[in-house]
Image (tube, helix red, strand yellow):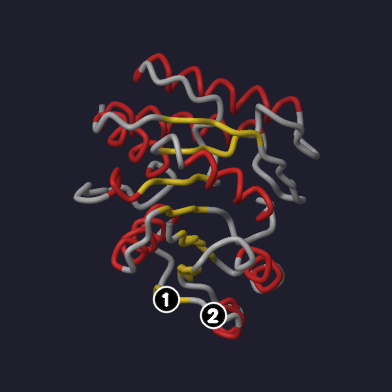
Amino acid sequence: MKTIAVIPAFNEEKAIGKVLEEIKKFVDEVIVVDDGSRDKTTQISNKEKVTLIKHEKNEGYGKSLRDGIKKALDKKADYIITLDSDGQHNPKDIPKIIKGLKKHDVVIGSRFTGKTSKHTLKRNVGLRLLAIEFFLFTLLFIKDVQSGYRGYRKEMLKDVRFKEKGLGFSIEILIKLKKRGASFKEIPIKVKYFKGSRSFFSVVRQGVEIGKTILKYF
């Protein structure tokens, strides 16, 4: 089964080289979507011999994933895995996601089923509240609805039209795939948090955006 990783990136020159080196050990191809970076993200990605999609301006996290997923489908991927370019996600978890995709349509790397480094109590509470909000509207219980570390089977993504350009994409795709009858599985992952990671209050603002996205698509 052909596995392609899709990596959205914005000004990640410090981390992306090492991240790509590790990811390539576990997948057949890598697609980097440089979302209007003004640093050396593009140059470093090119050195790693990945497929590069370059946005001339910053178009948003969701738009980056949409473009990367479309390219992966064009390349005949069977499994598509999305993860961050800043080193927050551990590429060594990719085999666990691939294993999960053998039985499920969507596999989500969850920060709440394993140990997480530097995970503050306030942030933990905020993210759990997002999960409750999502469940109340959709009846789909996912502990980590905003995790960007995910795997998808190609059958679920074909012929689905996505619209969100920002963080709302993470919710839009779950809702639309649930409507298609997708099966979901969460697996534990380890996540590194860096200085400047989102606070409880920024998670609350995410909650407002998630609520709007839910009402829009469900």
Residue 17: x and y, percent?
A: 67, 74
Considering depth in this image, is 79 or 200 the residue closer to the camera? 79
In the image as oriented, which residue stretches furthest toward the right? Answer: 118
Secondary structure under badge 2?
A: helix
Q: Residues within 10 Å of mark 1 (few under 14, many from 20)?
A: some
Q: Is residue 200 left or right of 54 when viewed as pictured?
A: right
Query: Which numbered dot is residue 177?
Result: none
Image quarter where the N terminus lies is bottom left
Give the residue drawn at x 58%, y 39%. 109
Residues at circles 2 and 1 in contact by the CB criterion of under 8 Å? yes
- The residue wearing badge 1 is 54
Q: Earlier in the sequence, mark 2 or mark 1?
A: 2
Q: CA distance from mark 2 to mark 1?
A: 8 Å
Residue 28: x and y, percent?
A: 50, 67
Whether 175 is drawn above or below 168: the answer is above
Residue 93: x and y, percent?
A: 65, 48
Give the residue drawn at x 28%, y 46%. 155
Whether 3 is drawn above or below 95: the answer is below
Give the residue drawn at x 49%, y 30%. 185
Secondary structure under badge 1?
A: strand
- The residue wearing badge 2 is 42
Tag 1: amino acid: Lys
Q: Residues within 10 Å of mark 2 (few under 14, many from 20)?
A: many
Whether 106 is drawn above or below 124: the answer is below
Residue 101: x and y, percent?
A: 46, 42
Tag 2: amino acid: Thr
Considering depth in this image, is 103 or 36 the residue closer to the camera? 103
Considering depth in this image, is 201 or 29 the residue closer to the camera? 29
Q: Is residue 81 left or right of 24 when viewed as pictured?
A: left
Image quarter where the C terminus lies is top left
